[in-house]
Amino acid sequence: MTYQRDFARKLRVGVVGLGGHAYRNVLPTLHYLPVELAALCDVNADLLTRTAAEYRVATASTDAARMIATEPLDALLLCTGPRFHPELAIMAMEAGLHVWMEKPPAMRAAGVEAMIAARGDRVCAVGFKKDSMPAARKARELLALPEFGALRSLLAVYPVTIPRDGARALASGLSPAFLEVGCHPLSLLVSLGGPVETVTTLRGPGEEAVGVVALQFASGAVGTLHLAGGSPALQAGERYDCFGEGQSVSIENSVRVAWHRGVPFTYETQREFIAPGIDSGSVVWESSNRQGTLENKALFVQGMYDELHDFCDAALEGGQPGIGTLEFALQVMRGYEAALLSNGEPVAVAGASSVATPVALA
């Protein structure tokens, strides 16, 4: 682990958007990255002034376009909300800057397509933290094992709702919870299962409905996203299950990964749930929460560090990000739109076979 003060090479970065999420998560994560925080921008002048004083940043602007045009930066971090991301990202990339943005990347898939067209040789990444968290990386490793076999099905449970009238929600220009929050489980399902060909949504009662989103992957696997809106506050109600050929992998509450291998079983004569040796049964990895070390901090458990570190490495080394690519973001956004438009019938996802899945971090 290397801290900001230890890096020999650093990116000069500016941050646009200093709201609660940026203040709680993005700015603190910079402490562990090869960056020099050189500029801050927010339309709230008072918030901007106080944050700049706290972080001792000399350049503080309420005008993002002016900051991009005049400040000698290497990269821009966008935390402004999806409606502003495409315009600001394109502006920054045309000025020669690398761009990282918080999820969601845009209001519609077309916004991601516009950023891809403008990217050129710049690095541009989207912070899908669920796809970046250590538990997800471990799950991808386990799914790639020969003994796991082909992925057959996926199940995700996440406390979020979906608008009753999806077409109206898309046309309204507003950001429903299914965009702001639902992109978390959707992005991880796409990461684990690959490109999605069709999406079918079944809605329960309510204007902001609970429901089930069924995914048909190009690989032949199927997935279910259970929208568990109405779950009790702070309940550990997030989980993912991946089923292969006689094995399964689960992620619970971001901090527990289990590899279930089963035990030798005979229906007529079985009398024990355990078997000798260590070649069968389940293997579990989980956070101990015993020490004040980094692996227990939310910035690491939730993937904030990994997504930003991957972006910084790509920008410094002249490559492309291994996770959170715009191509991956486009697949997530197309799946999101299809889920909103479906009302019990399958909706095709455009370009599923041509969209690459992200590469797992080493």
Image (spheres, rainbow, N blue to C red):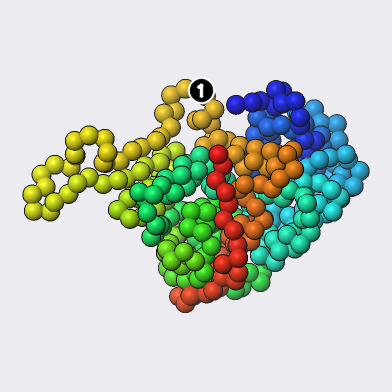
State the quadrant of the C terminus: top right
Residue, far right = 70
Which residue is found at the position 52% from the left and 37% from the top? 301
Element carrying mark 1? loop
Q: Nearer the viewer, residue 128 or 246?
A: 246
Residue, far bottom = 345
Q: Kindly identify the amino acid type of the residue bearing the numbered disc 1.
A: Gly
Which residue is found at the position 73% from the left and 55% from the top? 85
Which residue is found at the position 78% from the left and 38% from the top? 13
Residue identifier under label 1: 292
Q: Nearer the viewer, residue 105 or 136?
A: 136
Q: Position of residue 25 (x, y in %)?
A: 63, 38
State the quadrant of the N terminus: top right
Query: Can residue 335 be seen by looking at this rendering?
Result: yes
Which residue is found at the position 64% from the left and 41% from the top? 310
Against 355, is 257 above or below?
Answer: above
Residue, far left = 269
Judge the density around disc 1: few (<14), some (14-19), many (≥20) Cα neighbours within 10 Å: few
Q: Position of residue 22 (x, y in %)?
A: 68, 41
Total marks shown come to 1
Against 49, is 329 above or below?
Answer: below
Q: Nearer the viewer, residue 146 or 135?
A: 146
Q: Position of residue 148 (x, y in %)?
A: 36, 50
Q: Position of residue 303 (x, y in %)?
A: 56, 41
Residue 274 in the figure: left or right of residue 360: left
Residue, far front = 146
Against 83, is 297 above or below?
Answer: above
Against 74, is 296 above or below?
Answer: above
Residue 109 in the figure: left or right of residue 240: right
Query: Residue 235 lies in what quarter of the image?
Result: top left
Query: Can residue 88 be seen by looking at this rendering?
Result: no
